Image: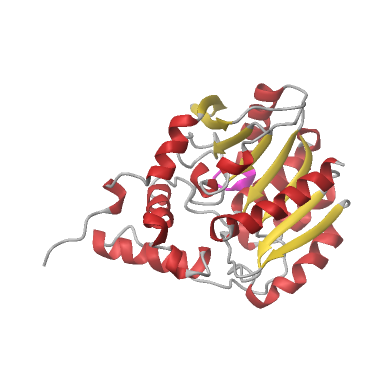
Amino acid sequence: MVKAPSLATLPLPPEVTALQQRARRESTPCGTGDIVWHVWGASQDGALPLVLLHGGSGSWTHWVRNIHDLEHGREVWVPDLPGFGDSAAPPVGGDADALVEPLAEGLRTLFGPRPCDLVGFSFGGLTAGLLLAAHPELARQLVLVGAPAMGVVPQRQFELKAWRHLPQEGQIAAHRYNLAALMLQDTSLIDGLGGLALKTHVANVVRDRMPRRRLAHTDALARALPLVPCPVHAIYGRSDALYKEWIGALEGAYAAAAPDFRGMALIEEAGHWVQFERPQRFLQALDDALRAGAA
């Protein structure tokens, strides 16, 4: 039987390579290494920096289908969060709370007293909420995309398959299963678009050095949001696997937790990785939120 190639050794899709080549790369201290920041675009008319935080077991590539549109008129900063991608692990801890101080130091180093507009996806949304609860001056507004830890689900709504112990064919099958179980409602996108979702996912998970994260399965974000005074917006896919039938309880949970909650947009025909699955609908919802918060 001919062995399937390991996708981890294959070149990334051209969309990823092209974005990498156009990015400016900056770094800020993190433990014994650095946080790597990927930067696109340039600010126009005094626009604040737009900072995007990726999800768990991810990297900047969680935003691969959005950066090209977002960089027009904005300077877009996308770090590999500590413990993921090209960034060093945080100096202490292994969950979202361990990322707060390295990110705060990084944002102050990069922007000085200027705040940013902060957008966090999934684990990055939890991280963003904890960050602004501790350092509210760092952002003008917060947009949470598919964020967990709002305390509205009675039990975990999905199970993922372990893969590191498997032969390469089994690993790839497990990655496909996990993308379908958690990330994407439209499973044709797992191998569609030239394998963009699958190949970026594989490249990301093999560099995840934070495997024992647990805060996403608590109400940690709901407990942090009362300390976040800036406008807070939420964007979710209607079929987000984190919530499933509990998605309807989210808006009330946000309204109860965030002092300046501005509303929640639900994107139809989309799962957890909403910005990848329905990029144009997501970008419209994000633009609406950012404009409202800036006003």
Which residue occupies the foreground of this view, 120 or 155? 120
Q: How is the image coloured?
A: secondary structure
Instruction: Locate residue 91, reporting x and y percent.
Output: 54, 34
Which residue occupies the foreground of this view, 263 or 29? 263
Instruction: Locate residue 55, reporting x and y percent.
Output: 56, 51
Relative to 185, is 254 above or below?
Answer: above
Magenta stretch, residue numbers: 93-97
Relative to 119, is 152 above or below?
Answer: below
Quarter of the rendering containing residue 115: top right
Instruction: Tell me the residue at 74%/56% (across/down).
Output: 234
Quarter of the rendering containing residue 282: bottom right
Instruction: Locate residue 206, reporting x and y percent.
Output: 37, 49
Instruction: Tell me the residue at 32%/66% (across/down).
Output: 173
Q: Quadrant of the C terminus?
A: top right
Which residue occupies the foreground of this view, 295 or 219? 295
Can you name the residue that lies furthest to the bottom here? 245
In the shown orientation, is residue 46 left or right of residue 84? Answer: right
Asked whether residue 62 appears in the rendered view, the answer is: yes
